[in-house]
Image: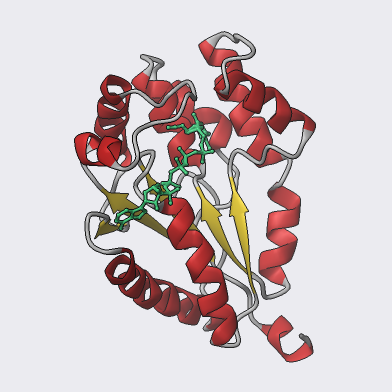
Amino acid sequence: EGSKKESRGALIVIEGLDRSGKTSQCSRLVPFLEGQGVSAELWRFPDRTTNVGQTISAYLTNTSQLDDHTIHLLFSANRWEKRSLMETKLKTGTTLIVDRYSYSGVAFSSAKGLDIEWCKAPEIGLLAPDVVIYLGISPEKAAERGGYGGERYEKLEFQKKVADCYKVLRDDSWKVVDACQSIEDVEKQLQEIVTDCVAECRKGKPLSTLWS
Ligand code: Z5A
């Protein structure tokens, strides 16, 4: 541990439509990094373990109803309640692989018709990822993967709108990986991206905040 503390960890965010393979890939990246001698943890948003997260979970499973603005702010609050721990982890040398982040927050709420700038505002000041990896897949192909479960947003028409909103958010810094390849081929590309990112952060790339 001790010698790792001189350099910070990387904040690596994986985004993509439902069923694009985020969870599968995130859970493979952590042991890969550990095998390279990099201290790493898997995080996900929503973090359903907190009080706010339980309210979000009830909404997603349709056991409660909330106004679109209210649920948007709760998703954001769920990231804010983890912000200081996130900063501590990164500064003490742990790399975080994060399954969904602010981009999901903005894409899903703006897909419902909320103003995109309004959606971005509560995210200002959260830690900015060192890299955003987008697992690209068409909504139709994603829907073929074992079909959707019963959660609120798991419907093809809505996923198409989300895909359009992600396109608006995406900039040249995002790494877009074709999620229709085999799990192993996607994994290899992600390994290269995260290895480069971790090295860049070790060399002293400063932490920054959203939106940058
Ligand atoms: N949401 C929001 O509105 N606002 C916010 O701020 C945040 C989120 C953070 C819950 O998210 C919902 O909350 C989500 C966005 C919204 N709603 N939707 N849709 P979640 O993270 O709890 O749920 P999810 O993202 O939908 O997870 P998911 O269904 O588990 O999708 P995934 O992680 O991307 O995929 P996976 O579980 O890794 O893989 C899906 C299946 O495909 C599985 O059977 C795999 O074995 C298979 N798979 C994976 N990769 C491949 C490849 N390469 N080939 C073939 N098959 C594959």
> Dividing the picture into quarters, in which one does residue 80 lie?
top right
Left of 204 or right of it: where is 189? left
Question: What residue is at 30 percent from the left and 66 percent from the top?
Answer: 186
Residue 79 x/y as whole percent = 64, 40
Please indicate whether residue 183 sits to the left or right of residue 211 in the image: left
Between residue 182 and residue 211, name the one nearer to us.
182
Q: Quadrant of the N terminus?
A: bottom right
Q: Nearer the viewer, residue 203 or 110?
A: 110
Q: Position of residue 192 (x, y in %)?
A: 35, 77
Q: Is residue 101 above or below residue 178?
A: above
**Image label count:** 0
Q: Is residue 86 above or below residue 186?
A: above
Q: Where residue 40 sits: x, y (%)?
A: 62, 71
Q: Residue at x 42, y 27 (%)?
A: 108
Is any part of residue 209 visible from this angle? yes
Colour mode of the rendering: secondary structure
Asked whether residue 204 is in view, the answer is: no
Quadrant location of residue 141?
top left
Q: Is residue 18 left or right of residue 97?
A: left
Most foreground residue, 136 or 90: 136
Figure quarter occupied by ligand 1: top left
- Considering every residue shown, the one lying at the far bottom of the view is 3
In the image, residue 70 lies at what x, y percent?
60, 15
Q: Is residue 70 above or below residue 48?
A: above
Question: Residue at (54%, 14%) from the top-left corner?
Answer: 69
> Is residue 53 placed above or below 88 in the rendered structure?
above
Q: Residue at x 64, y 12 (%)?
A: 64
